[in-house]
Image (spheres, helix red, strand yellow):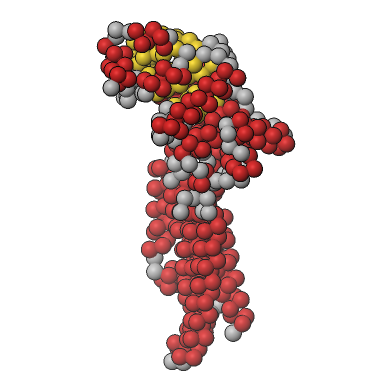
Amino acid sequence: MELEFRHVTFVRDGQAVLRDVSFSVAEGETLVLLGASGAGKTTALRMVNALAMPTSGEVLVGGKPTSAWDLITLRRGIGYVMQDHGLFPHMTVDRNVRLGLELQGRLPAEASARSRALLAELKLAPEEFLQRYPRSLSGGQKQRVGIARALATDPGLLLLDEPFGALDPPTRLELQEQFLELRNKYRKASMFVTHDVAEALRVATRIGLLDGGKLEMDVSPAEFRQSSHPVARSFLKYLEM
Amino acid sequence: MFPLVLEHIWLVFAATAIASCLAIPVGVAISHRPSLARWFLSGASVAQTVPSLALFGFLIAIPVVGGIGPRPALVALIAYALLPILSNTVTGLRNVDPGLREAGLAMGMTASQFLRRVELPLAAPTIVAGVRIAAVTTVGTAAIAAAIGGGGLGVLIFRGLANVDTGDILRGALPAAVIAMITDGGFSWIEKRLSHYWPS
């Protein structure tokens, strides 16, 4: 499912959070929105599943403006991975993963098989993890479950909001690898938010640089590395340290 | 004495059950409406501030729900039990992590699905704590219900006080204390069971 932002502006409390932002993401692509805190990255992400609506302009999902979608249908067709995983603490890993399928009214046997398959794919042995509660998992394991939950309904679009931001560097690297494997396998359009330039260069097919709510550039990782844009340079300087 | 113990337990059970049936749905309905919640909680607080003996006496003069006997006693006990259950229901639901609310919305849950699948289970330990406080308090307040013919262990306590008979007073007070402790322990156990998934 493709995604498009057309001249999107978002104003909150009289202040423009996003200013005339336009881009599109095709199937199989990962657009990484890179920017400092407060640049408008998460707001842009929240507009895709209509957790926020544009003040002007349009966000199109599957060619249809989000305002024209039934919100429940729209959201059930989009996988969302949050920085703090957003797992429900009173549900086992199995119930967390299959919840989206249950909401769609899928049969328990189908939901159960999907949950087991996804956990195995994310290197969490089902027999060990299915019945565990989120409190007993490490940060990396929680995030894996979060990814499994986002993929469970086979969504057309994947949103990732600083998904590996709270993880230690080795786990972060491992999960980035897994994300790339999954992307190559499932070929979903994905929008990935981060402020880590190394992560952006690693997982992106395109990098969108947001600064003060403006999309300063929308380029390939190779082009980003060569960019002379001052904000891009300030991010790249971090790599040279 | 045994019939009085049973009568006392029945009063506590009926008052707590009816108060729960009233306060929990109201708490759910008002939890995300702050101004409405303020009104309801203020109303329940007012009922709580009236001294119990005065409320029992006041009810004698009220037609239909008032008078003498177990019915007005039950009405007063319900009024007392409402506040802790209502306020804990509101608090429990309001304390659900906003991040989980966002996760639920993003997954495409409807408001009622989120309430049933996430909010109520997460708020359950707090709600049960409210019911526990209400039940334990009602055990004590029910003893005063004997002043208007409500029955229960208060009959023994009031008789003991009138006759200056310590034996009667203890025969009323000790079982009431045991009922209160068992009630507290039982609800505490349920609370713990419901919150077993939280990090310790």
Quadrant where the image shows the N terminus of chain B:
bottom right
The image shows a total of numbered marks equal to 0
Q: Is residue A95 above or below residue A70?
A: below
- Foreground of the two, B159 or A108: A108
Can you tell which quarter of the image residue B71 is in? bottom right
Q: Position of residue A174 (x, y in %)?
A: 48, 29
B185 vs A12: above or below: below
* In-front residue for pair B164/A152: A152
Is A152 displayed left or right of A180 in the figure?
right
Where is residue B64 drawn, in percent x and y? Answer: 56, 64
Q: Is residue A61 left or right of residue A8?
A: right
A205 up-or-down from A128: above or below: above
At which x and y percent is residue B49? 38, 63
Task: Tell me, yes or no, if residue A116 can be seen here.
Answer: yes
Going 52% across and 86% down the picture, which residue do you hit?
Answer: B171
Is residue B78 in view? no
Name the residue at 33% across, 8% down: A227
**Residue at screen point 63% across, 39% down:** A126
Depth check, front residue: A171 or A213: A171
Give how far across and how far down residue A60 sits, in percent: 51, 13
Q: Nearer the viewer, residue A142 or B145?
A: A142
Query: What residue is rendered at 44% in x and 19% in y?
Result: A202
